[in-house]
Image (cartoon, rainbow, N blue to C red):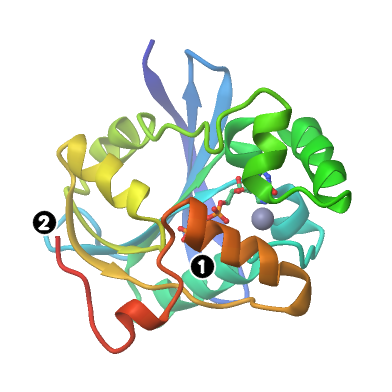
């Protein structure tokens, strides 16, 4: 089932006035949003981010993760360039949903790490897929991205669907004592590139 474009509007923010594009994924019923700024369909690589929904981090100021800070940093970077896209993907809790994420947090409060908690609940460590991004990027005319992420799986998913990742731009922000173990587990078990290995350089795919 397709992902269909529904409507677009202005979205003023403290960083810039973005254009907000709404999409419906008819297979899952999920409603995704893209914020865009500037001329993004001219073929040149576009500064971009695939941001997975995190209600607790993005809206409720949680310090268990780095999501809210990454969201803000990505929008600020796009505003600075005057050009870019942020895909806000409704795949809360790495795809397990909000209530299961709270169950996973409960297990983490009892000592499990983020991967063990998912597995104890019967889920894979990361249940996300990024297939919905292709029709959204096609609709916007974006073929090539400079992707802000520390997650090599996002780079691979885009590359596999034929989107060029011209560059990976590290996004290290929002570290605090509460998310130290979480970020360490992402690096050791979920392949995230958390810093030292890429300082001062840029990955080119
Ligand atoms: N299941 C589960 N999901 C979590 C947990 N903490 C954060 N999330 C979700 O993880 C997603 C964010 O994933 P991250 O691994 O932080 O980062 P990423 O988006 O893969 O990679 P970056 O692009 O580098 O930020 C969001 O959907 C969050 O809701 C957790 O402990 N358990
Ligand atoms: Zn989060």
- Does 45 sit left or right of 157 as displayed? left
Q: How many labels does the image show?
A: 2
Q: Residue 192 at x, y = what percent?
A: 44, 60
Side of 4 where 157 appears, left or right: left
Q: Could you tell me which residue is drawn at 76 percent across and 31 percent down?
A: 100
How far is mark 1 from mark 2, CA to CA?
22 Å
Determine if residue 112 is in view. Answer: yes
Instruction: Residue 46: name its quadrant.
Output: bottom left
Instruction: Say which residue label 2 marks.
Output: 43
Whether residue 16 is visible, yes or no, is no
Q: Where in the figure is residue 135, as x and y percent of width and height?
A: 30, 30
Picture quarter with the C terminus: bottom left
Disc number placed over residue 123 in the picture, else none: none
In the picture, which quadrant includes the N terminus?
top left
Q: Where is residue 153 in the image (x, y as percent from the top left)?
A: 35, 47
Q: Is mark 2 within 8 Å of ligand 1?
A: no
- Secondary structure beneath dot 2 equals loop
Residue 27 vertical placement versus 190 (above, below)? above
Q: Residues within 10 Å of mark 1 (few under 14, many from 20)?
A: some
Of pointers 1 and 2, the one earlier in the residue sequence: 1
Q: Which residue is drawn at 69% across and 58% down?
A: 58
Q: Are marks 1 and 2 in contact (CB under 8 Å)?
A: no
- Is 167 placed above or below 99 here? below
- Residue shown at the point (43%, 78%) measured from the top left: 195
- Residue density around tag 2, few if under 14, some if 14–19, many if 20 or more, within 10 Å: few
Q: Residue 17 shows which numbered tag?
A: 1
Left/right of residue 7 with respect to residue 107 in the rendered view: left
């Amino acid at each position: 089932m397709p992902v269909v474009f529904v409507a677009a509007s202005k979205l003023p923010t403290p960083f810039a006035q973005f254009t907000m594009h709404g999409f419906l994924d008819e297979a899952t019923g999920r409603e995704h949003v893209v914020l865009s700024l500037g001329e993004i369909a001219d073929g040149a690589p576009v500064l971009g981010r695939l941001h997975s929904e995190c209600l607790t981090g993005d809206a409720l100021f949680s310090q268990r993760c780095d999501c809210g800070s990454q969201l803000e940093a990505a929008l600020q970077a796009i505003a600075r360039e005057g050009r870019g896209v942020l895909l806000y993907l409704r795949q809360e809790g790495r795809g397990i949903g909000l209530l299961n994420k709270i169950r996973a947090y409960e297990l983490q409060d009892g000592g499990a790490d983020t991967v063990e908690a998912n597995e104890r609940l019967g889920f894979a460590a990361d249940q996300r897929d990024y297939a919905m991004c292709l029709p959204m990027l096609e609709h916007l005319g974006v073929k090539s991205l400079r992707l802000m992420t520390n997650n090599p799986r996002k780079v691979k998913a885009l590359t596999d669907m034929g989107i060029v990742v011209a560059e990976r731009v590290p996004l290290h922000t929002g570290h605090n004592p509460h998310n130290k173990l979480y970020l360490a587990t992402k690096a050791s078990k979920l392949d995230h590139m958390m810093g030292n290995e890429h300082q001062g350089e840029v990955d080119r795919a």
